[in-house]
Image (cartoon, rainbow, N blue to C red):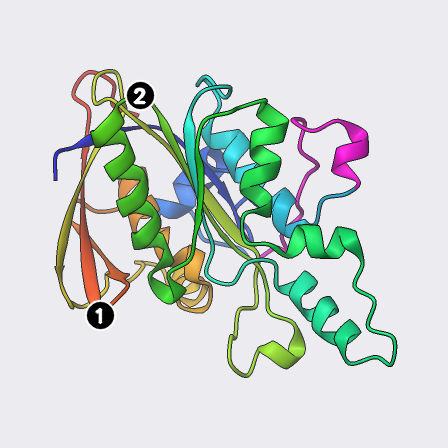
Amino acid sequence: MNPVGIHAVGLIGPGLTDFPSAREILAGREEHLYAPVQIPPTSLLPANERRRTTQTIRLALHAAEEASEGGDRTSMRSVFASSSGDMDIIDRICETLTQPDPAVSPMQFHNSVHNAPAGNWSIATRNPAPATALSGFTGTVAAGLLEAVTLQLAEGGEVLLVCYDVPSMELFREVRPVHEHFAFGLRLGPVAGAPWRLRLEPRPQAVETRCRADALEALRDTNPAARCLPLLERLAGAHAQEVVLEAPAGRSLAVHVEESAEDTP
């Protein structure tokens, strides 16, 4: 595929507050120290709308807000990708349905749909552009990248990609053992003026790239959205080789990144 530009990055995870402060950790120059994720309230929604959001929505919007800084939020297309969606709301609805009077809260039902973060993003930014919500199990990051890069190459302009996953509730952990909050975002656009150039190469099944640091590898291995960490390490300058991600349907996705000679971060 032809290259696209990466213009900005968003990040939130355990011990990873945002991309600028995490760069030294991702580059291997500082040790990663675990700290529970504290999701700050988004400044994009008015107070009455913020009260209706869930942790999952706030997590995705935080990564979206950071990655979209400097872009036109009112017009960029977006792709929101999550392996499991809002696990907390799903758990609550399932619990409600086991009761003698299974009355599901309209607000819980509203927030349970897979495109709830994408919808809140469109509302918050007053953006009528198309917003895609998708899932690809443990290949969700690759699926999101393919969708977002294809949109940018086909239609030009800027595309926001946000990948996020939240911890599974106790009963779900037997089949979906996700233990930490994690989200990242990329603002993709034309190559000109971008700090990085990214090119995708779909491949048959291949060995995934692991993180250089053991603590980050443990996070990558237990949260589908965190499968992006080797790519973020590459953006931070930790290594120069390509990054291979698991993709849906038993395939892999090789990601090639180059720093811009004009604007090296």
Left or right, residue 128 beside residue 41: left
**Amino acid beneath label 2:** Gly
Q: Is residue 196 visible?
A: no
Quarter of the image with the C terminus in it? top left
Establish if 105 lies above or below 59. below
Establish if 220 lies above or below 196. below
In this figure, which residue is indicated by the disc labeled 1? 250
Find residue 46 and report its horizontal and vertical position in percent: 75, 26
Question: Which quadrant would residue 167 be assigned to in this image?
Answer: bottom right
Residue 16, magenta (yes or no): no
Foreground residue, 235 or 256? 256
Magenta-drawn segment: 34-51
Q: Main secondary structure of the magenta part?
A: loop
Decide: marks 2, 1 in contact (CB < 8 A)?
no
In this figure, which residue is indicated by the disc labeled 2? 157
Establish if 210 lies above or below 259. below
Residue in the picture at 75% in, 36% down: 50
